[in-house]
Image (spheres, grey):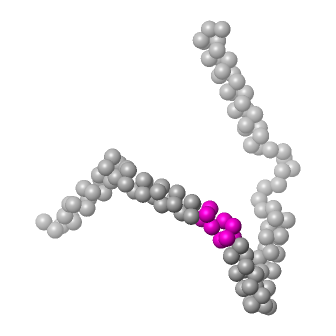
Amino acid sequence: MSTSESTKSLLGQVQRAARRVERAGRGPAEQRVGIDKVVFGVAGLIAVAFIVWGFASPDSLGTVADAALAGVLQNFGWLFVIAATVFTIFVLVVAGAGSARSPWARTARSRSTRPPPGSR
Protein backbone atom coordinates (compact mmCIF):
# COMPACT_ATOMS: atom_id res chain seq x y z
CA MET A 1 0.00 0.00 0.00
CA SER A 2 1.45 3.36 -1.00
CA THR A 3 1.61 6.40 1.22
CA SER A 4 -1.24 8.17 -0.58
CA GLU A 5 -3.44 5.07 -0.36
CA SER A 6 -2.74 4.65 3.34
CA THR A 7 -3.41 8.35 3.89
CA LYS A 8 -6.74 8.11 2.05
CA SER A 9 -7.63 4.99 4.03
CA LEU A 10 -6.78 6.69 7.29
CA LEU A 11 -8.73 9.79 6.31
CA GLY A 12 -11.76 7.64 5.48
CA GLN A 13 -11.55 5.91 8.86
CA VAL A 14 -11.34 9.24 10.65
CA GLN A 15 -14.34 10.60 8.76
CA ARG A 16 -16.40 7.48 9.55
CA ALA A 17 -15.43 7.74 13.20
CA ALA A 18 -16.40 11.42 13.25
CA ARG A 19 -19.82 10.58 11.80
CA ARG A 20 -20.31 7.87 14.46
CA VAL A 21 -19.40 10.30 17.21
CA GLU A 22 -21.75 12.92 15.78
CA ARG A 23 -24.61 10.42 15.64
CA ALA A 24 -23.89 9.22 19.17
CA GLY A 25 -23.86 12.80 20.41
CA ARG A 26 -27.36 13.39 19.14
CA GLY A 27 -28.71 10.33 20.91
CA PRO A 28 -32.20 8.92 20.51
CA ALA A 29 -35.08 11.34 20.23
CA GLU A 30 -36.69 10.02 23.41
CA GLN A 31 -33.54 10.65 25.47
CA ARG A 32 -34.23 12.83 28.49
CA VAL A 33 -32.38 16.11 28.80
CA GLY A 34 -32.05 18.13 31.98
CA ILE A 35 -32.29 17.19 35.63
CA ASP A 36 -32.83 13.57 36.54
CA LYS A 37 -35.76 13.94 38.93
CA VAL A 38 -35.09 10.66 40.75
CA VAL A 39 -31.46 11.48 41.52
CA PHE A 40 -32.34 15.07 42.44
CA GLY A 41 -35.19 13.89 44.68
CA VAL A 42 -33.08 11.31 46.52
CA ALA A 43 -30.22 13.80 47.05
CA GLY A 44 -32.68 16.43 48.26
CA LEU A 45 -34.35 13.95 50.61
CA ILE A 46 -30.99 12.99 52.14
CA ALA A 47 -30.05 16.66 52.61
CA VAL A 48 -33.39 17.49 54.24
CA ALA A 49 -33.10 14.41 56.48
CA PHE A 50 -29.71 15.62 57.77
CA ILE A 51 -31.10 19.10 58.41
CA VAL A 52 -34.10 17.71 60.28
CA TRP A 53 -31.83 15.36 62.25
CA GLY A 54 -29.62 18.33 63.19
CA PHE A 55 -32.59 20.33 64.46
CA ALA A 56 -34.28 17.38 66.18
CA SER A 57 -31.24 15.90 67.90
CA PRO A 58 -28.06 17.94 67.54
CA ASP A 59 -26.20 15.86 70.16
CA SER A 60 -26.93 12.62 68.31
CA LEU A 61 -25.87 14.08 64.96
CA GLY A 62 -22.72 15.51 66.56
CA THR A 63 -21.81 12.13 68.05
CA VAL A 64 -22.28 10.33 64.74
CA ALA A 65 -20.40 13.04 62.81
CA ASP A 66 -17.50 12.93 65.29
CA ALA A 67 -17.30 9.15 64.99
CA ALA A 68 -17.39 9.33 61.20
CA LEU A 69 -14.67 12.00 61.13
CA ALA A 70 -12.48 10.00 63.50
CA GLY A 71 -12.93 6.89 61.35
CA VAL A 72 -12.07 8.71 58.16
CA LEU A 73 -9.00 10.35 59.68
CA GLN A 74 -7.83 7.09 61.22
CA ASN A 75 -8.28 5.09 58.02
CA PHE A 76 -7.62 7.70 55.32
CA GLY A 77 -5.46 10.33 57.02
CA TRP A 78 -2.51 9.18 54.90
CA LEU A 79 -4.48 10.06 51.76
CA PHE A 80 -4.97 13.62 53.01
CA VAL A 81 -1.27 13.98 53.78
CA ILE A 82 -0.28 12.69 50.34
CA ALA A 83 -2.84 14.88 48.55
CA ALA A 84 -1.75 17.98 50.48
CA THR A 85 1.92 17.26 49.76
CA VAL A 86 1.31 16.73 46.04
CA PHE A 87 -0.78 19.90 45.85
CA THR A 88 1.88 21.93 47.67
CA ILE A 89 4.63 20.67 45.36
CA PHE A 90 2.44 21.38 42.33
CA VAL A 91 1.78 24.95 43.48
CA LEU A 92 5.47 25.56 44.15
CA VAL A 93 6.45 24.20 40.73
CA VAL A 94 3.82 26.27 38.95
CA ALA A 95 4.73 29.39 40.91
CA GLY A 96 8.48 29.08 40.53
CA ALA A 97 9.26 27.25 37.32
CA GLY A 98 7.57 29.50 34.81
CA SER A 99 8.29 32.86 36.35
CA ALA A 100 11.55 33.42 34.47
CA ARG A 101 10.37 32.08 31.11
CA SER A 102 6.76 33.19 31.11
CA PRO A 103 5.90 36.15 28.91
CA TRP A 104 3.18 37.09 31.39
CA ALA A 105 5.68 37.20 34.25
CA ARG A 106 7.95 39.51 32.25
CA THR A 107 5.01 41.77 31.44
CA ALA A 108 3.91 41.87 35.07
CA ARG A 109 7.45 42.65 36.25
CA SER A 110 7.88 45.43 33.71
CA ARG A 111 4.57 46.97 34.75
CA SER A 112 5.46 46.80 38.43
CA THR A 113 8.78 48.62 37.94
CA ARG A 114 7.36 51.40 35.79
CA PRO A 115 6.14 54.55 37.53
CA PRO A 116 2.36 55.01 37.50
CA PRO A 117 0.97 57.10 34.62
CA GLY A 118 1.03 60.83 35.24
CA SER A 119 3.64 60.68 38.02
CA ARG A 120 6.46 62.17 35.93
Q: Residue at 52% of width from left, 57% of height from top?
A: 86
Question: Which quadrant of the view contains residue 73?
Answer: bottom right
Q: Main secondary structure of the magenta part?
A: helix
**How many dots with numbers?**
0
Question: What range is drawn magenta here?
Answer: 72-80
Going 61% across and 63% down the picture, which residue do you hit? 78
Residue 119 is situated, as x and y percent measured from the top left of the image, at 16, 68
Instruction: Please tell me which residue is depicted at 30% across the width and 53% down the height of the picture.
Output: 107
Q: Residue at x 33, y 46 (%)?
A: 101
In the displayed structure, 50 sits above or below 33; it is: below
Percent across and percent down for residue 104 are 35, 52
Name above or below for residue 20 compared with residue 65.
above
Q: Position of residue 108 (x, y in %)?
A: 30, 57
Let me know if residue 85 appears in the view.
yes
Residue 63: x and y, percent?
74, 85
Quarter assignment of residue 2:
top right
